[in-house]
Amino acid sequence: MKTPTIKTTHDAFLKAACDELGYDEITFELLLTASREMRIELPLRKDDGSVVVYNGYRIQHHNARGPYKGGLRFHPSINAEESRGLACLMTLKTALVDIPLGGAKGGIDCDPLTLSPRELETLTRKFVQKIHREIGPSLDIPAPDVGTNAQIMAWIQDEYSKIYGYSPAVVTGKPLATGGSQGREDATGLGVSIVMEEFAKHLDESLLDKTVAIQGFGNVGKFAALALADKGMRIIGLSDVRGAITNSHGFDIQQVVQHVNKAGTVAGMEHAEPIDGAALLELDCDYLIPAALGGVIHKENVERVRARVVVEAANGPVTHAAEEVLTNRGVYVLPDILVNAGGVTVSYYEWVQNLQHMSWDLDAVRDRLRETLVTASQRVLSEVTSSQCSLRKAAYRIATERVKDALFTAGF
Ligand code: NAD
């Protein structure tokens, strides 16, 4: 028997959960390794007549609890290894919030910003032509991720529908015009605030007037900031790829959004002190929300993190080694598989609406999102209390056990 190699932070978290649950090496291997991995050659004739060959990937991790589900990234750095770790994370995330879906990830190693709209559309359609047999409403349902958007999902839906007939449920994160769901755009950021509120209740506190710093002001960071400001939190630090700012009195987030819409960055905001991007993670605050990249809190900078609670809105922002240091210091880490699960939860609602040929209004989507995330948060917090373990361990235990149960109950 070969021992599976632990390559990513998530592999290490999964291994720890399996060890604590007393699973043997075979079970760990079955939970870690992907069911199927695809690499697809994608030659593209560019507008200038030259040909560039891209690689497309789709890693289908597990479908024991439902069809594979996960995003497509268009980014030059995407490869099979990165997709593998993220696909596994999706399997755990869907299990933790108890929606009937599995986990997958993939994408194309292109830089979408350097492609013309025609090139981007052609490349996307070519990808579907090559993988259409392996995706579908009851097989594998892609969604937007870094570098992809609702328009790209509409092209995927259209190309797939040419072969199989009208099939909106083949992708989620679509535009409303082609069967998208109300409330998908801000679902992840809103979800971050719902999970934080449940956690604060667990500490017998409220979020009102607590200070928060957020790294990343994209889809997740911006909508989390808006939702947290609504709850009366003081957002004292913000950053994006072009700059970082602080204001000890707290920002008016609506004004920041207006500034970013004009300037394209939080940098240059009025009544704000510019700071170094790295210093944002070291601000003295109650809650620190990394909402941009993976691996940003690591063993070199973890000692300088001063927040009481780190909220993983991005996927994998705290490394395994850094988490150990934080936990030993009594800093809480709210884990990504719970914190940012709002996005896939509303993707699930979009899929359900498409399968039922119905559409729900915004209140119906938000009410269900709240119910799902509150239930999952309370389940994790009760496991923390009963097992006296970290939030990550509790979340991984619950998710891992659900996937393993489905896998072994179905049989081989
Ligand atoms: P996005 O592209 O919309 O925004 C990313 C933000 O991070 C931008 O503001 C960008 O400027 C900023 N950023 C990039 N590099 C930075 C750096 N070095 N320092 C500071 N800021 C930096 O992406 P997003 O959709 O908001 O996703 C952010 C993270 O959340 C990713 O890890 C993603 O995988 C994860 N996530 C997103 C969703 C979703 O629904 N969008 C769901 C689950 C998880």
Image (cartoon, grey):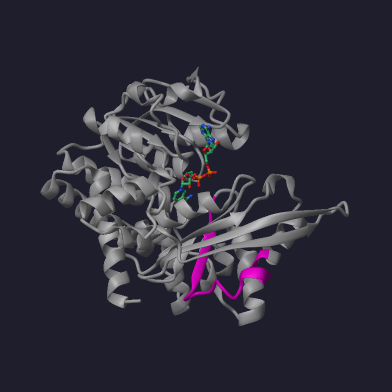
Check the image and report above or below for 90 versus 102.
Answer: above
Q: Nearer the viewer, residue 105 or 121?
A: 105
Q: Residue furthest bottom?
A: 165
Quarter the N terminus occupies: bottom left
Residue at 62 percent across and 65 percent down: it is 154
- Say whether residue 348 is left or right of residue 13: right
Q: Is residue 210 visible?
A: no
Q: Position of residue 305 (x, y in %)?
A: 34, 25
- Say whether residue 365 is left or right of residue 385: right
Q: Position of residue 123 (x, y in %)?
A: 71, 60
Check if residue 141 falls in the magenta segment.
Answer: yes
> Which of the 4 image quadrants contains residue 232?
top left
Q: How many marks?
A: 0
Q: Residue furthest left?
A: 386
* Span of residues in magenta: 127-145
Q: Is residue 101 visible?
A: yes
Quarter the C terminus occupies: bottom left
Check the image and report above or below for 66 versus 235.
Answer: below
Q: Nearer the viewer, residue 186 or 31?
A: 31
Residue at 47 percent across and 24 percent down: it is 278
Residue at 11 percent across and 49 percent down: it is 386
Q: Position of residue 72 (x, y in %)?
A: 56, 57
